[in-house]
Amino acid sequence: MKHINSYQELKLSTAGNKKVYLLLYKNGSEISDCALKNIEKASAKTSGALFLRSDVSQVKDIHGKFNISSVPSLLSFENGVMTNVIKGCNDESFYDYYFNDHAQPASGSEKPKQKRVIVYSTPSCSWCSKLKNYFREKNITFRDVDVSKDQRKMDELVRKSGQTGVPQTEIGSEIIVGFDKSRINKLLNLN
């Protein structure tokens, strides 16, 4: 990932490239370091895109241009236009899927798009680990949200499900409390 030092440098980089991803982060922040590490791993397996990074403690003129108030934030650009922002740190498989979801498959080889999957978990939860390992075994891309570190996400989860226990999985618009393999398989069309 190339480090950029100004908004002008970003404009020049996006002008000549169809797909550009820019990570705005703060060096030394645990969550920013997590995002940087996972994006670097996923970007190494992705072709046809330019990956940039900018430390907001050193570069002050980029985040204001795009109304970014928290880092880490991954900005996506297509043909010079910002198209999406992903906040926080996601696991490597999420970024793999995200970066490669924009590629157009060869005619006739298009697979149905996987439903959005979010796992709400805590690091000490053994069932959470089993659930995430199951998704990895089945090549299911998911976003892992550690509710022990984010009270807003815990509050959001309680609003959605009425439950505080983890794991909870959001598949599309449905919430599954616990590791209900048969319901997960049905919602994701797994055998």
Image (tube, helix red, strand yellow):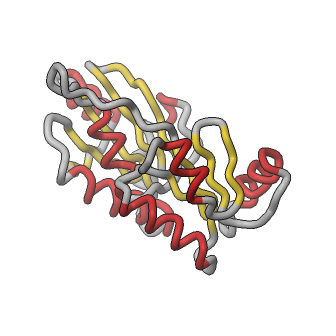
Q: Nearer the viewer, residue 62 or 119?
A: 119
Q: Nearer the viewer, residue 183 or 136?
A: 183
Against 58, residue 74 (above or below) is above
Against 63, residue 161 (above or below) is below
Residue drawn at point x = 43 percent, y = 37 percent: 114
Where does the image place residue 85, in percent across and percent down from the top left? 47, 35
* Count of numbered marks: 0
Q: Is residue 53 left or right of residue 171?
A: left
Quadrant in the rendering for residue 22: top left
Against 74, residue 179 (above or below) is below
Q: Is residue 40 left or right of residue 187?
A: left
Residue drawn at point x = 49 percent, y = 37 percent: 115
Q: Nearer the viewer, residue 35 or 144?
A: 144
Q: Is residue 134 left or right of residue 124?
A: left
Where does the image place residue 128, in percent across and percent down from the top left? 58, 70
Where does the image place residue 129, in percent across and percent down from the top left? 52, 73
Q: Is residue 26 left or right of residue 179?
A: left
Residue drawn at point x = 74 percent, y = 53 percent: 152
Where does the image place residue 73, in percent across and percent down from the top left? 47, 45
Q: Nearer the viewer, residue 50 or 10?
A: 50
Quadrant in the rendering for residue 9: top left
